[in-house]
Image: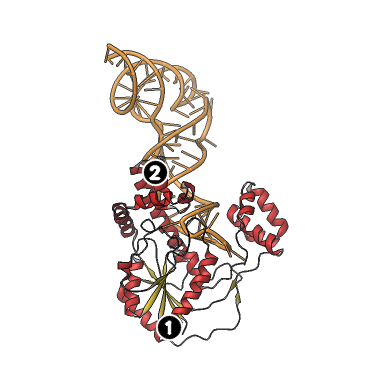
Amino acid sequence: MNKLIVILGPTASGKSDLAVRLAKKFNGEIISADSRQVYKGLDIGSGKITKKEMRGVPHYLLDVASPKRKFTVAQFQKLAQKKIKEIQKRGKLPFLVGGTGFYIQSIVDGIKIPEVKPNWKLRKKFEKKSLKELFLILKKLDQKRAFVIDKNNKVRIIRAIEIVEATKKPVPPIIKDVKFESLQIGITKSKKQLKSAIRKRLIKRLNHGMITEIRRLRRHGLTFGRLEEFGLEYRYVAQYLQEKITYQQMIEKIQKESERFAKRQMTWFKSDKRIHWIEDQKEAERSIKKFIKQKPLEFSNGSLILHGLRSRL
RNA sequence: GGCACGGUAGCCAAAUGGAAAGGCCUGGGUCUGCAAAACCCAUAUACGCGGGUUCGAUUCCCGCCCGUGCCU
C-alpha cells in the first residue's frame, strides 16, 4: 500500500494538533512539511511541536538541517519520499503535515526538480545584474523558458540560467513522477478565526521565550541577516534586537505579516482542486476511512509530462 | 500668550495657479532547488474650515480651528 494522507492549511489553523489525533486514530506517523521546522533551533518561533504534544506519535523531518545552511525543496523531497516509504513498509499510515505548499506539491505531484544544485556564487554574481540584462541572458540561452518565465522575477530567472549553465541544455519541461496515492485534507478557517488564532499564538510564543530563543541563535553564530531570512517571527524579532523597530512595532509586524502569509498559503492551496476541505475532525475521519478502503489505483507506467505548469485537476 | 512648521485617501507621503506622484494597508493571482521566499495585477467621490485675489485655487492672501516643536 502506498497511500499517503496530507494535512494542510494556513498557518495557525491547527494542523499539528489535528494530525496527531488522526495519526493516533489511524495508526499513523507524521512527516512535517514546513520549510522552517526542518532547522535545528528554530522551535518556538516556528511553532514546532513539542515532545509532549506529539503524544507518542513519531514525527519526522523536524530538526534535520543546520540553520546556518539553506535547506531546499529538493532536499525535502528526497528525505520525505524516503521516510514515507519507510513508514508504509512498516505497515503504518504516513501523514504529511504542513503549510509549505511547494514542499507538499513536490511529494503529491512528485515533480522532478532539475538536478542542479544551487550555485550560490553564481547567484550572487547575477544578483547584481539588472532584470533586463538577466532576461536577455536567459533568452539567449533558452528561448522557450524565457518565453514563459516571469520576466520580473530575478530569483526565477537566475535559477533558470543556473540550470542551463550547469546542464548545457535548456530547462527541462516539468515532469511528474507520482509515487504515492494521496488524500489531501485542508483545514478551513474564516479570516476572523485565523486572525485571532495568530494573535493568541503570538502572545503565547512571546511568553514562552521566543526572544530568548532568537538571542540564543545569535549566540550560536547566526547573523541578523540570516535570521531575517527565516521571515516573520525571526525577521521582526531580529529587527527588534537590532533596535530597528520597537517591541510594539515588532508585534504588529509579526501579526500583519502572518495574516498576509496565511492568505498567500490559501492562494496556493485554492488552486488545487483535489484538496478535501474539512471543518472538523469528524469530517476528516470520514474521508480518511473512505480513502483507506478504496482499492489502490493502478499507476500508469512512466512519468507524466505536464504541458501546463501545475496540475489543476 | 508669542514664534516656527505642518494639516492631501484607512495610514505614510510628493508635486502643482489650469483635469492631484508614489508607498503601505486591502482584494485577486503567479510559482521547475532560498517558497514564512520571490514576483504580478487591481483598488480610492483624498487637498482642515470660512472668506478674498484670479478667467481659473489644493497651490497666492486674510481669518479661524487642529497638531507638533521652541520660547515666555
- Residue A125 in the figure: left or right of residue A296: right
Q: Residue furthest bottom?
A: A295
Residue A10: x and y, percent?
39, 62
Mark 1 or mark 2: whose residue is earlier in sequence: 1
Q: Nearer the viewer, residue A299 or A126?
A: A126
Residue B20: x and y, percent?
50, 36
- Residue A196 in the figure: left or right of residue A74: left
What residue did someone put label 1 on?
Answer: A90
Q: Is residue A312 visible?
A: no
Q: Residue furthest front?
A: A220
Q: Please state which amino acid type lies under the numbered disc 2.
A: Leu
Q: Give the Cα distance between marks 1 and 2.
A: 46 Å
Q: Please state which amino acid type lies under the numbered disc 1.
A: Arg
Question: Residue at the location (46% across, 71% down)?
Answer: A273
Letter of the chain that mark 2 sits on in the rendering = A
Q: Could you tell me which secondary element the residue under label 1 belongs to?
A: loop
Q: Is disc 1 surrounded by few (<14), some (14 to 19) or many (20+) residues within 10 Å?
A: few
Q: Which mark is residue A241?
A: 2
Q: Is residue A46 visible?
A: yes
